[in-house]
Amino acid sequence: MAINKKQSSLWVKVVLVFVVVAFVASLVPALFMGGGNTQQATGATETGATLERIANDHLPAVNSYTAMLASEPTSYTALVGLGNTYFDWGVQIQQGLGPNTGHDLPYWASATTAYERALAQQPGDPNVSVDMAIAYFYSGQTSRAIEVAEQVMADVPEFAPAYFNAGIFYRAAGRMDDAAVAFTRYLEIEPDGQSASAAQSMLAELPATPSGEATTTP
């Protein structure tokens, strides 16, 4: 499924990545049982072909935005567009190769750099900030992702995507109380939102905690 990076329903992007990644991961054992060196060589060839195909999908946009930035280095439109392109690049690699290959990491890093530059020009855009938090998360910087999401929740308290993504970040960090608060708040704001079903499922799957109190209230 293609992901629209035109700043609409941004919190859905994380759900799509998680769902597709889970599906790909479920296929990995069957794909790599037996075959020895021949299968490894075939896998390497297929990986290279997938990476090349994905690169061909995104390089034209990268080149276009890079050219725009060469003449106007502070162009907010070009910087966000560049960040979005690298974001989609990383997503496609996860979808095509799985979440743990490492091939996607440079593109998340490039996305965060572009988003950081964009926000330096126009601070406070919650859409771009949440995208940046997601990119931080997939680059392995969960704490940084949480910091950005918490800032959005503080600055724009009714911005539902921040809560949904914060719930995912908190859950990954083992902060289950905080995840429960974030998912619950998302459902209060968007009870019929596109991610409501996913939020309800993840909320139901959270383990009970002794305290029953969140350490952070978004």
Image (tube, rainbow, N blue to C red):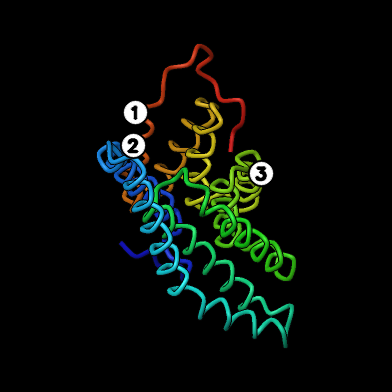
Instruction: Give x and y (percent) for residue 28.
Output: 31, 41
What amino acid is labelled 3 in the image?
A: Arg
Q: Which mark is residue 144?
A: 3
Residues packed near mark 3 inside 10 Å, few (<14), some (14 to 19) or many (20 plus): some
Identify the residue at image location x=73%, y=71%.
121
Can residue 84 be seen in the rendering of this structure? yes
Q: Amino acid at mark 1?
A: Ala
Q: Give the side of residue 158 with respect to residue 37, left or right.
A: right
Q: Position of residue 108 (x, y in %)?
A: 57, 56
In this view, the residue farthest toward the bottom is 71
Q: Residue at 64% across / 46% down in the picture?
A: 154
Residue 153, image x and y in percent? 59, 47
CA neighbours of label 1 inside 10 A, class few (<14), some (14 to 19), many (20+): few
Q: Residue furthest top?
A: 210
Answer whether residue 191 is visible to the viewer in this image. no
Residue drawn where x is 54% and y is 51% of the image: 134
Q: Are marks 1 and 2 in contact (CB under 8 Å)?
A: yes
**Image quarter in which the C terminus is found:** top right
Distance CA(mark 1)–CA(mark 2): 6 Å
